[in-house]
Every structure is written in C-alpha cells, then in structure tokens.
Image: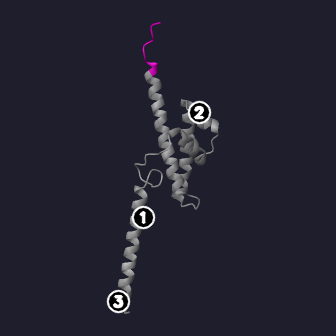
Amino acid sequence: MSNHDQTTLYGNVKRQTIQSRDAFWEKKASCGPGLGWHANQPTRPDDASRRETMLPRLIPVSPREVADLSIPGRRYIVMRLAKALRGERMRGRAGHWTYSLNRHIGLLRAYRSEREALKQLKTMQLATKHLPPRLV
C-alpha cells in the first residue's frame, strides 16, 4: 500500500466512525422517554420533586427550608442562591481551579426558577389582597 492509499483508508474509516457515532446519538435521542437528552422529553419530574433534590446539592439548606413555600421561605432561598451564584461567578472570573461550569449553570437555573416562583407568589398575594370582601 502506498502512503496515499493509507490516508484514503484512514479518511474513510474516520468518516464511517463519525457517521456511526451520529447515527447512535440520533437513535438514542429518538428512543423512548428518559433515554435521550432532548428538550422535549415528556417525563420530566415536577418542580417540587426537582426542587427537593437539587437545592440541597447546590446550597446548604435543610429539608425544612426546602419545604417552606411561603414568600419569606422563597425569599431566603433566593438570597442563598444569589450568594452562591456570586461566589461561583467570582471563582470563574479568577480562573480558580474549583470553578465548575455545571454548578454555575445549575445555580443560575435554580435562581431564575426560584425568583420566578417568588414573583408569582407575590402577584397572587396582591391579587387576593385587593378582592372585595365576601358578603356573608
């Protein structure tokens, strides 16, 4: 075999490997629920169970603090997430070896989710506060 034949052979093998790898991931994504990582996955856990499992992994909170869904409880969680996010952002900017992009993304998602839930709670409370009293 000449040198040209080896590169052609290697190029074909490489091309076949990439095609088979792409086919594998397409098949994996098109499998049933829970087997692939795609955005339209139908079997996502509900927000409460995800909150109960993910918050203690991101920030040091007790199960009682996680279970508290009141406005002060949510505000406390948002404050703790903001503090952890600020620290993670500082580690990232400094190039510290303990910086984790996955942790940063998780903190950011949890912070946005909690902040949105807190906003909804506040608007619900304002809406119910201004209702006319019932006639009894």
Circle 2 residue? 68
Query: Who comes first in sequence, dot 3 or dot 2?
Result: 3
| Percent coordinates x, y for residue 17 in the rendering | 41, 73
| Percent coordinates x, y for residue 19 in the rendering | 37, 70
Circle 1 residue? 24
Give how far apart the Cα atoms at labels 3 and 2 are: 69 Å
| Three-letter code for the amino acid on which mark 1 is drawn | Phe
| Three-letter code for the amino acid on which mark 3 is drawn | His
Q: In this view, does 132 lie above or below 40?
A: above
Name the element at disc 1. helix
Image quadrant occupied by the N terminus: bottom left
Label for residue 4? Answer: 3
Q: Which residue is drawn at 56% across and 50% down?
A: 87
Q: Name the image quarter holding residue 79.
A: top right
In the image, the segment drawn in magenta is 128-136
Give how far apart the Cα atoms at labels 1 and 3 are: 30 Å
Q: Considering depth in this image, is 19 or 72 the residue closer to the camera?
A: 19
| Percent coordinates x, y for residue 119 in the rendering | 46, 33
Query: Who comes first in sequence, dot 2 or dot 1?
Result: 1
Dot 1 surroundings within 10 Å: few (below 14), some, or many (20 or more)?
A: few
Q: Name the image quarter holding residue 130.
A: top left
Dot 3 surroundings within 10 Å: few (below 14), some, or many (20 or more)?
A: few
Q: Considering depth in this image, is 131 or 7 the residue closer to the camera?
A: 7
Judge depth for marks 2 and 1 and give the one in front: 1
| Three-letter code for the amino acid on which mark 2 is drawn | Asp
Q: Considering depth in this image, is 72 or 42 the residue closer to the camera?
A: 42
Label for residue 117? Answer: none
